[in-house]
Image: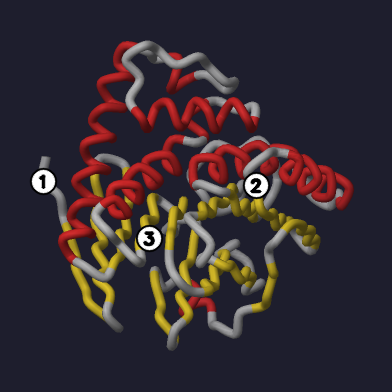
């Protein structure tokens, strides 16, 4: 399978933008060999997932938690565990789990800065503060400030208006920050499904539920003109044009800006 890759270098970091199967990937670190290690592990685990789901199709189609099979790979096991915590099907946490697996490989190789974005689900470990921007498809330039210096964190969003992913709710963006991307991915799906357009109570209940799940650090939900948030996240308004919001990655001084979910034509 051929893989198209675009590699750039800026401010001491390598950025590899590539695709593999259905995944749009951005892998970032200070060392190109570490970036390549992250990609290699991602591909290895993605193929392991493919082999697993061919024997266990319920992993793909179930909208509820499932039990892992005996031959489950580390990524499958992580997705199953995270989805069980959130009460959703395992596919809701798979992109985040794959990003986490790649990050684990990069950290094992000694990465000081390791960032993997898999279709908008972000797993990262870095030694500074990060600003994550949320593209909602509307005029609101919403962002959040994260302290990434205390360990790996995951960031995920669920959207009924922008993302291709399945959502039964009406959130423009349901953003979760958690101890890993698999959990963030699963919980963002769960709370995104709870949101009803124009109903502030549904946003508040969704935030409350998210923060009750062990491992979740913060939650921001935006729907129409309504915004609700809680936990250790700091929502901010980004001073950026719509064109700038559509940039994949921007670097300003010592602060990193990531934008998600994946862009739709």
Residue placed under numbered mark 1 in the picture: 2
Q: Earlier in the sequence, mark 1 or mark 2?
A: 1
User: In the displayed structure, does residue 130 sit left or right of residue 23?
Assistant: right
**Residue placed furthest toward the left:** 2
Residue placed under numbered mark 2 in the picture: 216
Residue placed under numbered mark 3 in the picture: 115
Measured along the vertical axis of the image, is residue 148 above or below residue 192?
Answer: below
Q: Nearer the viewer, residue 222 or 125?
A: 125
- Disc 3 and disc 1: Cα gap in Å? 23 Å
User: In the displayed structure, does residue 55 sit left or right of residue 144?
Assistant: left
Residue 84 in the image, given as x and y percentages of width and height: 59, 25
Q: Quadrant of the C terminus?
A: bottom left
Q: Which mark lies nearer to you, 1 or 2?
A: 2
Q: Residue at x 37, y 60 (%)?
A: 115
Residue 225 in the image, given as x and y percentages of width and height: 79, 64
Q: Quadrant of residue 36?
A: bottom left
Q: Residue at x 39, y 72 (%)?
A: 249
Q: Quadrant of the N terminus?
A: top left
Measured along the vertical axis of the image, is residue 173 above or below residue 50?
Answer: below
Q: Secondary structure at mark 1?
A: loop
Q: Nearer the viewer, residue 239 or 232?
A: 232
- Disc 1 and disc 2: Cα gap in Å? 37 Å
């Amino acid at each position: 399978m051929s893989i198209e890759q675009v590699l750039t270098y800026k401010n001491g970091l390598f950025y590899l933008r590539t695709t593999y199967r259905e995944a749009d990937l951005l892998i970032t670190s200070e060392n190109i060999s570490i970036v390549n290690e992250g990609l290699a592990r991602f591909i290895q685990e993605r193929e392991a997932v493919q082999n697993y789901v061919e024997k266990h199709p319920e992993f793909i189609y179930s909208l509820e938690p499932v039990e892992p099979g005996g031959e489950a790979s580390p990524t499958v096991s992580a997705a199953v565990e995270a989805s069980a915590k959130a009460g959703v099907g395992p596919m809701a946490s798979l992109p985040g789990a794959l990003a986490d697996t790649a990050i684990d490989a990069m950290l094992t190789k000694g990465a000081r800065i390791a960032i993997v974005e898999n279709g908008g689900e972000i797993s990262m470990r870095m030694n500074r503060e990060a600003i994550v921007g949320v593209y909602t498809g509307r005029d609101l330039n919403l962002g959040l400030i994260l302290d990434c210096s205390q360990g790996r964190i995951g960031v995920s969003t669920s959207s009924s208006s922008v993302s291709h992913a399945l959502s039964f709710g009406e959130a423009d963006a349901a953003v979760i920050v958690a101890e890993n991307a698999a959990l963030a991915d699963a919980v963002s799906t769960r709370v995104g499904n709870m949101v009803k357009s124009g109903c502030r109570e549904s946003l508040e209940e969704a935030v409350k539920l998210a923060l009750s799940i062990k491992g979740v650090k913060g939650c921001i939900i935006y729907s129409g003109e309504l915004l609700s948030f809680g936990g250790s996240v700091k929502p901010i308004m980004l001073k950026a044009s719509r064109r700038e919001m559509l940039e994949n990655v921007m670097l300003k001084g010592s602060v990193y800006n990531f934008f998600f979910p994946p862009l739709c034509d």
